[in-house]
Amino acid sequence: MGDMQESSRIVAGRERAAVAKRLVAFAAVGGFAAVLVLARTAHPGAVATSSTLSPPAALVSQVEAGSSLSGGSIGPAAASAPSVSTSTS
């Protein structure tokens, strides 16, 4: 009789675990679908109305007055030849 109670408890536990797994799977699918719908409504692929974007007034005035950034160099001047030496033995 003790063996019968133990196996019925195991079967009941397995059934509860299967139900819990199904609930978690359905909740995950539902959550994914909700996020997908929210993302589609919040960020449409194309803008419905056409509008032209203009730069901020501060940027326009800075460009008109001249940039406050100084120029730099990325590499050596174009007139200088690179120093490369090769040798054979």
Image: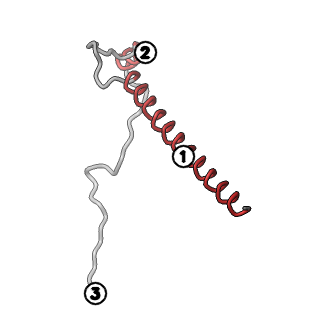
Question: Nearest the camera: 1 or 84?
Answer: 1
Residue of label 1: 21
Q: If you read the primary sequence from the N terminus, does the residue marked by circle 2 or circle 3 appear first?
A: 2
Residue located 26% across and 83% down the image: 88
According to the picture, the residue beneath numbered tag 3 turns out to be: 89
Residues at badges 1 and 3 in contact (C-beta under 8 Å)?
Answer: no
Question: In which quadrant of the rendered image does the N terminus lie?
Answer: bottom right
Q: Nearer the viewer, mark 2 or mark 1?
A: 1
Q: Secondary structure at mark 3?
A: loop
Snapshot quadrant of residue 82: bottom left
Q: Position of residue 81 (x, y in %)?
A: 27, 58
Q: Which residue is mark 2?
A: 58
2 and 3 marks in contact (CB < 8 Å): no
Q: Residues within 10 Å of mark 1 (few under 14, many from 20)?
A: few
User: Mark 1 vs mark 3: which is more N-terminal?
Assistant: 1
Q: Which mark is residue 72?
A: none
User: Mark 2, residues whose alpha carbon is within 10 Å: few (<14), some, or many (≥20)?
Assistant: few
Q: Residue at x 28, y 15 (%)?
A: 48
Q: Secondary structure at mark 1?
A: helix
User: How far separated are the C-alphas under marks 1 and 3?
Assistant: 73 Å
Left/right placement of residue 59 relative to residue 26 reads: left
Residue found at the very far bottom of the displayed protein: 89
Local SS, label 2: helix
Q: Identify the amino acid type marked 1.
A: Lys
51 relative to 24, above or below? above
Q: Which one is in front in this view, the residue at disc 1 or the one at disc 3?
A: 1
Extreme residue in the front direction: 1
Q: Give neighbour class at mark 3: few <14, some 14-19, many 20+ (Cα, 10 Å).
A: few
* Front-most of residues 22 and 50: 22
